[in-house]
Amino acid sequence: MEKNLSKTYDPKQFEDRLYEQWEKSGAFHGKRDKSKSPFTIVMPPPNITGQLHMGHALDHTLQDVLTRWKRMQGFDTLWLPGSDHASIATEVKVADKIRTEEGKTKEDLGREEFLKRAWEWKKTYGGKITEQCRKLGDSCDWERERFTMDEGCNKAVIEFFVRLYEKDLIYKGNRIINWCPSCGTSLSDAEVEHDDKNSKYYYVRYPGEDGSQGIVVATSRPETMFGDVAIAVNPADERYENLIGKTVLLPIVGKAIPILADPYPDPEKGTGAVKITPAHDPNDFEVGLRHDLPQPSCINEDATMNALAGKYEGMDRYECRKAWISDLEAAGYLVKVEDMVIPVGECYRCKDAVEPMLSEQWFVRMEALAKPAMEAAAKGDLTHVPERFEKIYLHWLEEIRDWCISRQLWWGHRIPAYYCDDCNEIMVAREAPESCTKCGSKNLRQDEDVLDTWFSSALWPFSTLGWPEKTPDLEHYFPTDVLVTGYDIIFFWVVRMVFSSLEMMDEVPFHHVYVHGLVRDGEGRKMSKSLGNGIDPLEIIDQYGTDALRFMLATGISPGSDIRFKLDRLESCRNFANKLWNASRFVIMNLLDEEGNFLPMAEESNGIEKLSLKDEDKWILTKLNEAVAEVATNMENYDLALAGQKVYELIWNEYCDWYIELVKARLYGEDEADKQVARFVLVKVLKDMLALLHPFMPFITEEIWSFLPGNGEMLIVAPWPVHSKALDFSEESRRMELAMEIIRSIRNIRAEADAVPSRKLRAVILSTGEALEAVKAGESYLKNLANLTEVRFIDDKAQIPEEVMSAVVDGAEIFIPLDDLLDYKAEYQRLEKEKAKLEGERSKLSAKLDNPGFVSKAPEAVVAAEREKLAKAGSMLEKVEERLSVVKQKI
Ligand SMILES: [Zn+2]
Ligand SMILES: [Zn+2]
């Protein structure tokens, strides 16, 4: 058995091994221990199609930091992992695979066979991302791993649907939905991204039926004109007062449509007159309802034109637009064309332009559900960290429209609605009915569509704990404590979990929403496939180790803000790990005898404060104690970055840079009792620091911990350090800091004077009163760490020696004689060299000027210049010799 850490820090040697050890030990498992308070987080389920990216790495690091911290605090922690079936994304992937490998479409295979393939795909690839999560060190409970389409979650989805339907919160209706022609499915509002596009406004004249000029309308989508059923004008718009009630003709087509008054048209926009196409625009749809207008469609689901478009039937929508406009122009109906920037809705998956379409779909009625979700935030049952995200949450809820939940896909939860082919009765049921409840017919068929993926993830915080059953897990762990998520899915996910939970569980699903930002590249750009600027966390882990990556992510953020991924920061995090490793190795080396057994250490049984502690011991214990308190506050406030930085400073600046140096002389000294105290404090502080750092850097801390004296318990379940009043040695600590301040200033003087650290110095310190006592107490530290042969105390300015370099600290002035700082021997040698060089130059110049040939032939100016040089060399030589004789006396 190795007794000490290996020479160099190499995370590959232990990260995987420790992860396995933790998992096997059962430390990740939620024990449902009634004697402890629970602490629960549900993991946002990554898509089974997903690859681990930096966003996950950040999200998971934050969740793991919280989980490990709470576990060490003695909570019964449960971090529940799982994955999402990702309806559209998976269906597209599987369909692509079948197309490339077999040349078939999903329709060729049929629903049953396609689903079989999809499950196979899930079995092969779906576990990849959870495997990758282990590399991040996620201490989640794999025994409770769930999948949004597993049996329990499936049951929960059906139950949720049926209950909402029974309360009339789900309905089937004709609505304008967002349709993606490429994916062949409807999209929820949140699945549509809006992008400003250069487009055009076409001004088209609709002639009057009576042969008059008619009316001019501006439209960006002339291809939808075939679905026009009216022209609307604002009743307050005086320009059109006389036209209301008149009839115009759809140009070229010749169909007669009315001009009607409605508050929807904005007189300031375009011509103030608007064409009404209820089947292809959500606003027009509403206008149509108000005036009881028909709803003809002119575009097919694949974005080609239908029969209503006449000779353009079968053309793609954009192709039709072109042909139609040129025909309108030729016929004299196109008045003008304007360039315009128009927001265009795009499918979040394939970026195809979304087509608003009239369609029969299932909807969740949102008004009644949104209200309690807003109240929960107002009452403080649900808080956002940082607070500003509450506004966004509320905004979404205020603006919410009915949620279209049906999707024209196969991979997902099939809608539990059944239709009677004989009497058209609709039945919604937990189990497929045998016969029609109205007419008794057995000709039933289930709805072909599946539910929106978010319909199942909305239930995640309670479906994963066993709902709709009343399981012991649900009772113990629900509601969960905190949801950690990126701000980009507040609406998609957070809002929906909250209203679903309030409706089904009568409680919020979590008390806090901890919102973090995105990981951007070094230039601040979003990481994306198309930019090719994504950074694979697994590659980073391979190069730098998991701990360095985690520490960089956790300390690089402030809540809610984006983080930039920078390699130099990552490197400095790895350097930090290195520093900790080397310092620990040094400590362990000094704890062992020649056989590799632990040397005796002082014991804290009567309280640490009862030991014969030196000032430096009291100082580091005080610093540790302060850090413990500060870290606790930061963690409670979700300021994880500040907590991590505090631990970093304690380890690097205080323990490694100072304490180890201060204590070295004692470790090598003769006083056995004092040695034992020194060992004890070294180990005590190191162990507590490792504990504080563990949530951030779990691997290196556990590895070091295993080499330190202890009871064999792993760090992952060791107790979290708590602040102790008995360890506040403020007076000794202040004294120590004064000594350190003086040492630092002497080191600065050395650096300025270019004097090497090994050079012995004498110091004169001017100080009086209390400060003098404090400085005197630290005299031995000064001598050791500033390498002084003598410290002389003076209390009067008149006693300050001449020729000194000086520094001022709070309470003392420090003077170091120049004679001590300057290295006269080296200076003498340098001057000797200088002298030889000048002598050589002088003799060369004299020889030249003594040569009559040169003096007579060379131009007068050249000769004069040479004479000048000779004189200069002579005078410099004189000065060097003078300085040499001074320096000679100092040696
Ligand atoms: Zn699409
Ligand atoms: Zn029936």
Image (tube, helix red, strand yellow):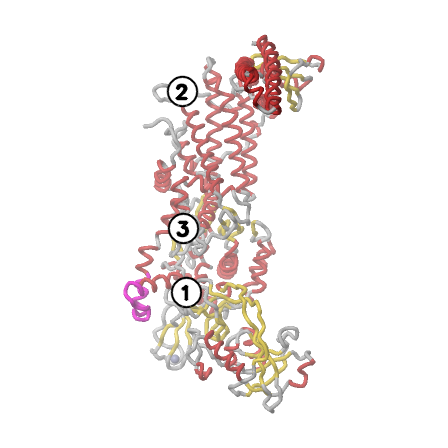
User: Residue beneath label 1, please?
Assistant: 158
Three-letter code for the amino acid on which mark 2 is drawn: Leu
Count up the numbered dots: 3
Q: CA distance from mark 1 to mark 2?
A: 65 Å
Compared across the picture, whether 253 is left or right of 799 comes to left
Q: Is mark 3 within 8 Å of ligand 1?
A: no
Specify the quarter for ligand 2. Answer: bottom left
Magenta segment's dominant SS is helix
- The label on residue 52 is 3
Separation of marks 2 and 3 at Cα, in angstroms: 46 Å
- Disc ID at residue 599: 2
Does the magenta-highlighted stretch encompass residue 352?
no
Q: Residue at x 31, y 70 (%)?
A: 110
Q: Earlier in the sequence, mark 1 or mark 2?
A: 1
For disc 1, the neighbor class at 10 Å (few under 14, some 14 to 19, many from 20) is: many
Depicted 641 relative to depicted 246: above or below: above
In the rendering, at what x and y percent does residue 362 appear?
A: 46, 71
